[in-house]
Amino acid sequence: MYKKEIRKKFLAQRKSFSNEDFQKACEAITKGFFAYADLSKVQFLHSFLPILHHHEIDSWQIINQLPAHLKVVVPKSDFKDCSMQGYLLEKTDLHTNEWGIPEPSGNGTPIPDQEIDMVIVPLLAFDQKGYRVGYGKGFYDRFFKNCRKDIQKVGLSLFPPVDTIEDLNPFDEPLDTVITPDQVYSFKN
């Protein structure tokens, strides 16, 4: 399948979830995350903040259960150049941008991309090789280029993988792991 088809299909499937089924799926993904994730060596964990009314996976369920030693970093997006800057999560500093995305105002503590140990990545779908389909702007692919090579890239998905994404770009970065409500998929060699 091509990215455009995948986006259309999985956005529609995501919207069809009842609130109850969506919450159950998020709880199962959270449980899978904590069963999978070795957080012992993670100091900085970067996580997206969900647009819950669009049924984006509720990453707050994970964030609110993280060990106290962990510092949570959240992105502020620049839509002019499709880049992101990470800031320490300070809940009093959050606002909703024009796209409906919760993000820091930018007045907080910026964290260099090279400091991040693990990133929790949003996605609409992924394939059998760990490549993801997001909203199509390339924010995370650009972000990964600035991170350390050993960063752990963990995707959260409501659905199992598609076979293949036909129109990958040279800058597309595969994930190391994707957690679904039913299974953890590992793509590390």
Image (cartoon, helix red, strand yellow):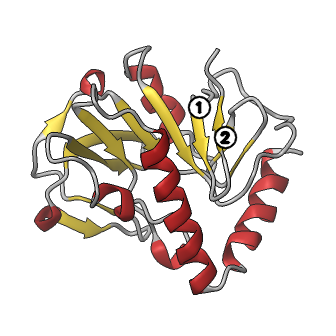
Which quadrant, please, contains the C terminus? Answer: top right
Quick one: 140 or 125, which is closer to the camera?
Answer: 125
Query: Which residue is painted at 32% across and 47% down in the image?
Result: 75
Inspect the image, locate mark 2, and give the three-letter code of the amino acid beneath it. Arg
Q: How many marks?
A: 2
Tell me if 64 is positioned left or right of 100 in this view.
left
Q: Please give the label number shown on residue 132.
A: 2
Question: Could you tell me which secondary element the residue under label 2 belongs to?
Answer: strand
Rendering coords of residue 185 (x, y %):
66, 38
Callout 1: 10 Å neighbours few (<14), some, many (20+)?
A: many
Rendering coords of residue 132 (x, y %):
66, 40
Tell me if 153 is positioned left or right of 132 in this view.
left
Q: Tags 2 and 1 in contact by the CB under 8 Å rule?
A: yes
Inspect the image, locate mark 1, and give the three-letter code of the amino acid beneath it. Leu
| Discs 2/1, front | 1
Q: Is residue 31 visible?
A: yes
Question: Could you tell me which secondary element the residue under label 1 belongs to?
Answer: loop
Q: Is residue 56 visible?
A: no
Rendering coords of residue 56 (x, y %):
53, 66
Which quadrant, please, contains the N terminus? Answer: top right
Quick one: 182 or 136, which is closer to the camera?
Answer: 182
Real-space Cα separation, disc 2 to disc 1, in angstroms: 7 Å
Q: Please give the label number shown on residue 175.
A: 1
Query: Which residue is painted at 63% across and 59% down in the image?
Result: 181
Callout 2: 10 Å neighbours few (<14), some, many (20+)?
A: many
Tell me if 180 is positioned left or right of 47 in this view.
right
